[in-house]
Image (tube, rainbow, N blue to C red):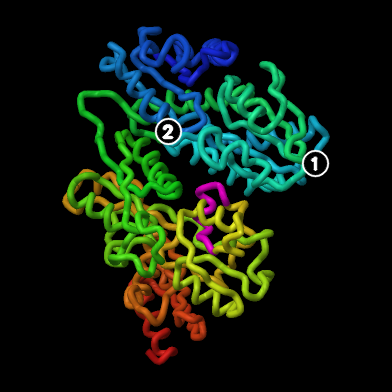
Amino acid sequence: MSRAALILAAHGSRHEPAANELLRAWAATLAARGGFDDVWAAFHQGEPTFAEALDQTDAVDIVVVPVMTSEGYYCDEYLPAELAKNRRYGSVRVRVTPPVGVHAKVPELVETRGLELAARFELDPGVCGVALIGHGTRRSAGSRVATARLAEALRKRGRFAEVAAFYLDEPPTVEEVPIHLTRANILVLPFLISGGPHAVRDVPSRLGLATPVTGALPLDGKAHGCRMICDAPFGTDPRVLEIIADLAKTARSDTASPQSNGSTRFRPGPAAPLRLRLGTRGSRLARWQADHVAARLRALGVRLEIVEISTAGDRLGDVAIADLPGDAPFTDDIDAALARGEIDLAVHSLKDLPVRAALAVAAVLKRGEVSESLVARADLRLAELPPGATVGTSSPRRVAQLLALRPDLVPVTIRGAVDDRVRQVRAERFDAAILATAGLSRLGLLCEAGEQMPLDLFLPAPGQGAMAVQCRSDDAATLEMCRSLEDAESRRAVTAELEFLRPFEFDRTYVAAAYAIASALDASPSSVLLRARLLSLDGQQVCDVSVSGNDPTAVARRAIDEATARLGL
């Protein structure tokens, strides 16, 4: 059996030697446990470097565990590129696991750290806010995505009063913690790996706390009218070692095939890996979606470049969406780049695509939350908004349903990305805004919503919450690869919804809303259940229908016939 080696790859720090020494100590612990012939640590800032890592052993079977919080530039681009510079790279088998920070046990560990911190300072965690601090960078959305997902996971676990994500290098920044969190006691949990200057000095000082000496965390202090307790960084917890060990063990057990599980991220060899360019809009939500798809494909060994493309919908930010040029102002420019061969893939929110294109996408990913949420001043619910309150939305469908429920409210056109619309409400430009729950959740902003609208009151746009991947129809290799992203249940559900929308897509009198539940298999005579709504633009006429059946298209057509007959259309 060939010799095997394990590399723990971390960013490291040249300013805080203790940060690198901790990883070296963990490498020694893992070496003593056995399972690998050699174990050592390598660093971006430290020795050995990533490029020198393969020189530390004569093993030909090498597992690399990125001791990093997220996918992104250092994990997905810099680390593989540096490893490939080594003279031995072409003659060894290298398997790179997912980064430590995306392991399934991380939410539980971070929650435990928060509970332990609260107990240490004799606080009830149920009345504490949690500020989860990620690094963030405009170079890649990986850190932001991982931190936002972790914040959402902590919220769902329900042990703390409120949880929000903040970042060192992008908004919402560390300084905004007291703006977004309302609790008198805030637990600050740095989702960072090392005890370098970011965690030890930057986070406390930017919160307005006294700058501690190295090793003085956790730090208890007061700033901005609240008590803040800043913990040591996540990556210094000795329990992280067990996550590293699990990632290494999983990768080590994959001896038959480099593609036998999700741990393997790339394998050098004579055949070059598939290289693709993925097009997306530049908003935070669009980048989240692109990074999500990119992570899925990179796990299959695909080399991806993300290309940001400006669309008419982005450029004409002062024009109401209904008045924008073209049938699909948020996707037409990306589709054109795809047709010209400037990109190989495109990622969209399915609801942004025209029906003809949405029904022909290469893959529909597993659907997220479909509902709408209300972001309002003072976190009011829809029923609590005073008469005459302004509600921002750019959707005629939302306007119609809003007026059907509360004709005393005033819909006002709002433009901008999801996070910008939230800021407009907080800046009191509007009393409230209606936003897709999925978008808020993906950006870690669900805590901004005062109410998640029940589906019986507010039906979503057809395809809402689903992401779609497009490629050229003659690109057989990319089409085949996209099959790994497909979710059959989501595809059947959105097909029914989009077919219901088809005759009303460009109607200036009525708007359509729909939500379907579908099973992946069509053996049942009622494997698709469609709830659909047709409304006049002023909300005065509302027709709800519910139809079930086996074929999504047939179900939608029956719903169309029933709704139009009842409205006399």
Binning the other alpha carbons within 10 Å of mark 2 as few (below 14), some (14 to 19) or many (20 upward) gives: many
Q: Nearer the viewer, residue 248 or 40?
A: 40
Residue at image mark 1: 124
Rendering coords of residue 503 (x, y %):
32, 77
Q: Residue furthest bottom?
A: 568
Q: Dot 2 corresponds to which residue?
A: 72
Residue 374, disc: none
Horizontal and vertical percent position of residue 2: 35, 13
Q: Position of residue 252 (x, y in %)?
A: 43, 23
Tell me which segment is drawn in magenta: 434-445
**Amino acid marked by disc 1:** Asp
Magenta stretch contains residue 498: no
Report which quarter residue 450 is drawn in: bottom right
The answer to whether 55 is drawn above or below residue 479 in the figure is above
| Rendering coords of residue 101 (x, y %) | 53, 32
Q: Earlier in the sequence, mark 2 or mark 1?
A: 2
Q: Is residue 440 magenta?
A: yes
Please report the residue visible at 39 percent of the width from the left and 62 percent of the height from the top.
351
